[in-house]
Image (spheres, rainbow, N blue to C red):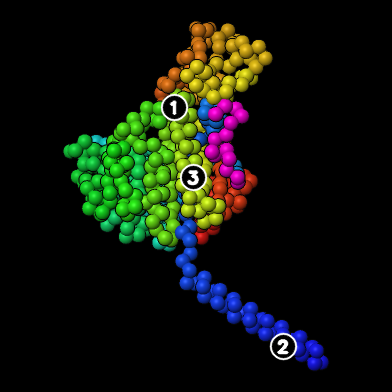
Amino acid sequence: MTRRYHTAAGLSVALLLAACGSASQQSDLTVATPPPQNVIFFLGDGMGMTTMTAARIYAVGEDGELTMDTLPETAFVKTFSNDAQVTDSAPSMSAYMTGVKMNNEVLSMSSDTRAIDPIADANGNKLANNCGGSNGNPVPTLVELAKAKGWSAGVVTTTRITHATPAATYTHICHRDLENDIATAMVPGGAGYNTALGTSGLDVVLGGGKQFFTPFKDGGKRADGRDLIAEMKAKNYTVASNATEFNAVDASKTERLFGLFTSSHMSYDLDRDPAKEPSLADMTTKAMDVLSKNSKGYFLMVEGGRIDHALHETTAKKALQDTLAFDNAIKAAIDKAKISDPTLKNTLIVVTADHDHTLVLNGYAKRTGKTSAGNAGVLGLVKNYVTGATEKDLDGAPYSIIGFGNGENRTQASRASMASLDDTTTSANTYHQEATIRVAAGSETHGGTDVFLGAIGKGADTFLGTIDNTKVFGLVKNAAGL
């Protein structure tokens, strides 16, 4: 009895001391400032897996690796929209940002929202809102959830910042083409402002699209006469309009950054003048520098948007170079994030695409290695992997490794007339690869194939298998504690 009593008493004292120690530790944890929680969501617009493969060969050869190839956690993502087997960017990005399936053309609205085309405004531009008063309801985005939690938030893109992908993060509207209305959603306190972004609004906005922030009389497309760039300046945003002004921005002294570098989309990376337009990598790291001053954390969306546009044009070289620029931005972001968070235990980085395109790799081509000044690489003609001889079709003409399911460049009769096709032609910056089905110039379509998702950092191990795009929202939300 006595022995049992002493044993029990000792156990009681031990438990009491443990409890006291636990209480002390809890007190210390309460006093300690929790580390910032950061999310960087990379979206390669139109970057299907075939485009990724071609970009890898283009940049580093068949046995090389892009940064996105090295991400430790991967998944396949289904991209269909609420009303279409093949999605456009609006509902696909909205699915990532809200977890809700919606109709093509719709931005971050409920599934019952109908996409109604804009009507002509006072200047004859089809930019006037015709959505109707009872056409669906807004659904919260990850950016809005981040702002509600006290985080900072930023949007970086190589397209117009009012374009579908960036717009899905911060606005709610029935049609993606209502870019004048979309622009007003980011001006704190102004008419049309999205109050779900809080009183301060987005902390960083970088991309193109000045025309939707500028009055019609000044060369823009705004019919309401508002100068939204001036309004953003009045809200204490540091404004940059070119690379020189952007490079001069001291992130340590900048609380809010607003950069518009072109009237419409920014240039393709092949055509970009570094003296006029910053790179996607530079915009990404500058955004991180500004946003990281928030001790609670930040949410940053980065879009490589012009991959999609080059694919619509069927200009493969532009698409592959923009994919490489996108990958460079991913590398720059990971490197910068690891400076303050070496193991990324408090940072989640997700890389994915919103949809596929119809780009294909033809034939049994021999390995080409990376593209260089003296080697067309994957942009060249199909050559036999045994003999090295140029392969021919049934008309006796050579054909390129890269082709498209549909596009503008389709020979209407025998391809015999293309017997002189060579690597120099097919690897040119502006060459439009051939397509199986002929459509209007610039009208190559999206594809419906699943897309790649890669992740690294906090909660990355929850991304696995084949998942719907709406599930990505919940995985990011849970990993970030939003």
Residue drawn at (67%, 81%), measured in percent from left and top?
15
Question: Where does the N terminus fall, quadrant-wise?
Answer: bottom right
- Residue 22 percent coordinates (x, y): 59, 76
Residue drawn at (50%, 17%), measured in percent from left and top?
374
Q: Secondary structure at mark 2?
A: helix
Is 267 placed above or below 382 here?
below
Q: Is residue 35 left or right of residue 61?
A: left
Spatial distance from mark 2 to mark 3, Cα to Cα? Answer: 55 Å
Q: Which label's residue is closer to the chain start, 2 or 3? A: 2
Closer to us: 261 or 90: 261
Spatial distance from mark 2 to mark 1, Cα to Cα? Answer: 77 Å
Q: Which label's residue is closer to the chain start, 2 or 1? A: 2
Residue drawn at (45%, 34%), measured in percent from left and top?
325
Which residue is most to the left? 217
Residue indicated by mark 1? 318
Q: Secondary structure at mark 3?
A: helix
Q: Badge 2: few (under 14), some or many (20 or more) residues near its Cα, within 10 Å? A: few
Q: Which mark is residue 9?
A: 2
- Residue 61 percent coordinates (x, y): 57, 27
Is 138 placed above or below 431 here?
below
Spatial distance from mark 3 to mark 1, Cα to Cα? Answer: 26 Å
Q: Badge 1: few (under 14), some or many (20 or more) residues near its Cα, within 10 Å? A: many
